[in-house]
């Protein structure tokens, strides 16, 4: 008798369990067909882990959502006053640049669309054209930027194009005191060849471009020729690995930044007008005179696949050292850092570095701005965030580019704007371009 009761109880439990499973299956089917919870959340997670066919090449623009709120002020008394110009990727492959308050209020924004600006050009399958890099605000409120590895574009404050160049501009942009624009770009290898031994047509041919405010290319400087003419052949063939040959191909150097020295003459080894280059793929920075073509300074290997580089007023160089060690191997997780190079003594100092208590790592992209109050504004692109850190290494403010609860978007740049650039400044600029 007891055995029969036990059988009935077990059978009853199995029926209830089967009923619950059936109801769950019915709801899941309903949710999948009607895009109800949890179907959208599961689909987003699956897309991140296993991208749909045809989108594998561009999904790196979307990252796991960074922690914390979108805008967070941790220490209001420690931050540099001013709006912040932020650029990056939004939802569905869109790009943006916006000037925001520290609380996240958008005072001015641009949402350029690649297809609208270049209707006769097929958007690159790898998604590079859908990245807005090098965003710089000009004195009249215009925005200049690169559609990565495709073009350099200037928009007015109303979003109207003033000019565009299909120059394959990419990475950072520098606006000199004369108003001229310096851009990292690329060119097709001439049909006659590169003019260099053991280098064929299958390379990325890096070019430094100086562009006028009206969009005229004033000067092109080929990096291959610059290195050869300064007896720096070892840098050109650094990627060769064969014992008996030095043939090289592909993205040999990857010119990731160009900047012009504006400091006083005699401060360090440089003169006003000297040009600083970052050659990411060979972990090299160098400075040269663009008029004579003479390299005055170069350093290799003190950093690993660095991106952004900047002059200081006294002739030192700030380097955003990505320290790309992907794929990470234990026991040490990779961490990016910001270092200061003394170009006279050869010494260096670490200004900020990622660690266990303050993680900071972006394998590529990234940017740093030295602020007047001594802080650093750091753009950690792949982590989908930017943050202001004090000289003591504590974060005073941060922005997280959250696209949803599960995903974040690439942040390509962030810059604190001068105090006079405020809401009234942008209202005046938009008033002029809308007339």
Image: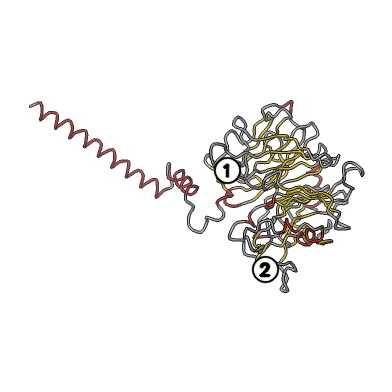
Mark 1 burial class by Cα count in 10 Å: few <14, some 14-19, many 20+: many
Query: Which quarter shows the N terminus?
Result: top left
Q: Which residue is denoted by mark 2 in the rendering?
A: 201
SS type, badge 2: strand
Q: Which of 368 and 132 is in front in this view?
A: 368
Extreme residue toward the left, this view: 1
Reply above or below: 261 against 396: below
Name the residue: 66% across, 34% down.
398
Question: Which is nearer the eye, 210 or 212?
Answer: 210
State the mark number for residue 45: none
Res. 54 visible in picture = yes
Left or right for 315, reference 71:
right
Query: Measured from the top left, where is residue 173 in percent x and y?
Result: 76, 51
Instruction: Tell me the number on the disc at residue 408.
Output: 1
Pick the front one: 216 or 290: 290
User: Nearer the observer, disc 1 or disc 2?
Assistant: 2
């Amino acid at each position: 008798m007891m055995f029969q009761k036990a059988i009935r109880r077990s059978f009853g439990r199995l029926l209830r369990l089967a009923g619950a499973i059936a109801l769950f299956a019915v709801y899941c089917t309903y949710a999948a067909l009607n895009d109800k919870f949890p179907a959208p959340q599961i689909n987003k997670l699956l897309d991140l882990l296993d991208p749909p066919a045809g989108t594998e090449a561009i999904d790196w623009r979307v990252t796991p959502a960074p922690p914390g709120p979108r805008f967070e002020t941790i220490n209001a008394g420690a931050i540099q006053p001013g709006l912040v110009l932020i650029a990056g990727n939004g939802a569905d492959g869109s790009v943006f640049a916006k000037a925001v308050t520290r609380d996240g209020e958008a005072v001015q924004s641009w949402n350029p669309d690649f297809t609208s600006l270049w209707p006769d050009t097929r958007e690159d399958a790898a998604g590079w054209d859908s990245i807005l890099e090098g965003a710089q605000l000009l004195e009249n409120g215009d925005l200049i930027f690169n559609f990565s590895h495709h073009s350099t574009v200037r928009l007015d404050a109303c979003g109207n194009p003033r000019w565009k160049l299909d120059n394959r501009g990419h990475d950072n942009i520098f606006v000199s005191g004369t108003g001229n624009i310096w851009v990292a770009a690329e060119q097709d290898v001439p049909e006659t060849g590169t003019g260099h031994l053991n280098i064929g047509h299958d390379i990325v041919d890096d070019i430094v471009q100086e562009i006028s405010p009206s969009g005229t290319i004033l000067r092109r400087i080929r990096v291959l020729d610059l290195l050869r003419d300064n007896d720096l052949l070892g840098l050109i063939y650094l990627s060769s690995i064969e014992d008996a040959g030095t043939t090289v191909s592909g993205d040999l150097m990857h010119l990731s930044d160009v900047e012009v020295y504006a400091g006083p003459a005699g401060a360090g080894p440089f003169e006003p007008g000297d040009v600083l280059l970052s050659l990411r793929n060979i972990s090299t920075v160098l400075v040269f005179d663009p008029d004579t073509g003479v390299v005055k300074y170069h350093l290799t290997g003190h950093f690993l696949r660095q991106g952004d580089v900047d002059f200081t007023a006294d002739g030192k160089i700030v380097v955003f050292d990505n320290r790309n060690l992907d794929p990470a191997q234990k026991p040490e997780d990779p961490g990016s850092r910001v270092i200061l190079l003394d170009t006279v003594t050869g010494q260096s100092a670490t200004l900020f570095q990622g660690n266990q208590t303050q993680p900071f790592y972006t394998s590529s992209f990234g940017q740093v701005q030295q602020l007047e109050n001594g802080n650093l504004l750091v753009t950690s692109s792949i982590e989908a965030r930017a943050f202001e850190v004090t000289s003591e290494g504590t974060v005073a403010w941060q922005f997280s580019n959250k696209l949803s609860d599960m995903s974040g978007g690439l942040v390509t740049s962030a810059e604190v704007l001068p105090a006079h650039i405020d809401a009234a400044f942008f209202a005046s600029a938009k008033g002029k371009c809308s007339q």
